[in-house]
Amino acid sequence: MKNDLTPHLDIALRHAPPGLTITRIPRVDICVGQGNTDKAPCLYRSMVCFILQGSKHVAINDNRLSYDSEQYLISALDLPLIGQIVDAEDGQPYVAVSLVLDPAILAELASTMPFVREREQNGIGIMINPMTASLRDTLLRLLALLDTPDDIPVLGPMLERELLYRLLQGPQGQLLRQIAQPDGALGSIRRAVAWIRDNYNSRLRIEALCDSSGMSRASLHRHFRLLTGLSPIQYQKQLRLQEARQLLLAGEHRASDVAFVVGYESASQFSREYLRQFGVSPIRDVRQIRQAISARI
């Protein structure tokens, strides 16, 4: 039996036009989009995502996941993925709600719960789990605050904590607790990822990553690939190409200029890697995206 998310959907569509809406509830966003056959790069933040309508496919290297309103997704760290949204069966748009995870709140909540002996995180830091009645109920009450915005400063933090508490009780409680532990492997890789994001257009320095993460070179490479599915240099390349695509779509730079803005030393190398990543050259890719957007208007 399908999850009844009709009330959640009604609220979301009242407050979110097509595109990404940053709501008045801190850390809560709503995405409304039309499904298509195109696969697009996207950066998943450290968050939990609930689909209210439609479904989504995401892939990072050989790891491929699909989820809809029957599941929720947890991403333990920022991950560059290839995503594809799919409309509902009746052609209605894809609608999803995301909550960016706050490590401080997770740590506070975890400290009040019974001690659990943790085992080492095994596998990529993104997981899909079945939706539950308690999560569905808490999410509805959180979204309902959009109809009474004066209640958000008082009730918003309480409902966010309740939602995170339910998640900590769920099958990925360990993953969430590790987000709140800066000294663990996940915390170390989250710091390395933050360094790469802040310096994506600079030459990657493994020594700097080791310093920021507090790991040896061997441990850094092992845990980085385990949790992200990528090596550090592959991760940086994904960020560079995603940023390049956004700059090209903005129309303010030529492809050769964009290459140097995002950190490439050679425009030809940039074009080769762009073609390998997106299947078409930079100029043709942007032209196709703009034509697709114009066709929908």
Image: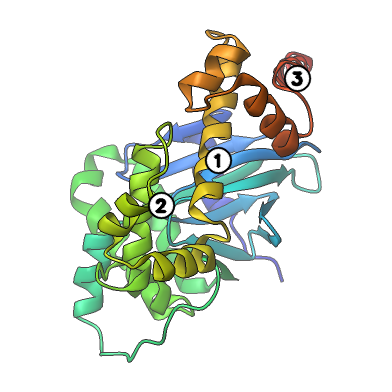
Q: Name the residue under label 1.
A: 237
Residue mark closest to the camera, 3 vs 1: 1
Q: How crowded is mark 1: few (under 14 residues within 10 Å), some or many (20 or more)?
A: many
Position of residue 289 measured from the top left corner of the image (x, y, whole percent): 72, 21
Q: Which residue is drawn at 57% across and 41% down?
A: 238
Is residue 94 shown left or right of residue 145? right
What amino acid type should be assigned to the residue bearing mark 3?
Arg
Tell me the amino acid under the disc marked 2. Leu
Q: Mark 2: give few (<14), some (14-19) or many (20+) Cα within 10 Å.
A: many
Q: Mark 3 points at which residue?
A: 296
Residue 141 is left or right of residue 5, and the answer is left
Query: Of the numbered discs in the image, which one, if any, rests on residue 99?
Result: 2
| 150 to the left or right of 67 | left
Residue 147 seen from this side: no
Q: Residue 107 at what x, y percent from top left?
A: 23, 69
Q: How far apart are marks 1 and 2 (CA)?
A: 26 Å
Q: For residue 31, what is the image quadrant?
A: top right
The quadrant of the rendering that contains the N terminus is bottom right
Q: Residue at x 56, y 48 (%)?
A: 234
- Does dot 1 land on a helix, a strand or a loop? helix
Corner quadrant of residue 83: top right
Few, some or many C-alpha atoms within 10 Å of disc 3 (few <14, some 14-19, many ≥20)? few
x%, y% of residue 92?
73, 39
Q: Is mark 3 on a helix, strand or loop?
A: helix
- Do the numbered discs 1 and 2 sit on residues whose CB atoms are within 8 Å? no
Label 1 amino acid? Lys
User: Is residue 90 found left or right of 268 in the rendered image?
Assistant: right
| Quarter of the picture holding the C terminus | top right
Of callouts 3 and 1, which one flags the residue occurring earlier in the amino acid sequence? 1
The image quadrant that residue 82 belongs to is: top right
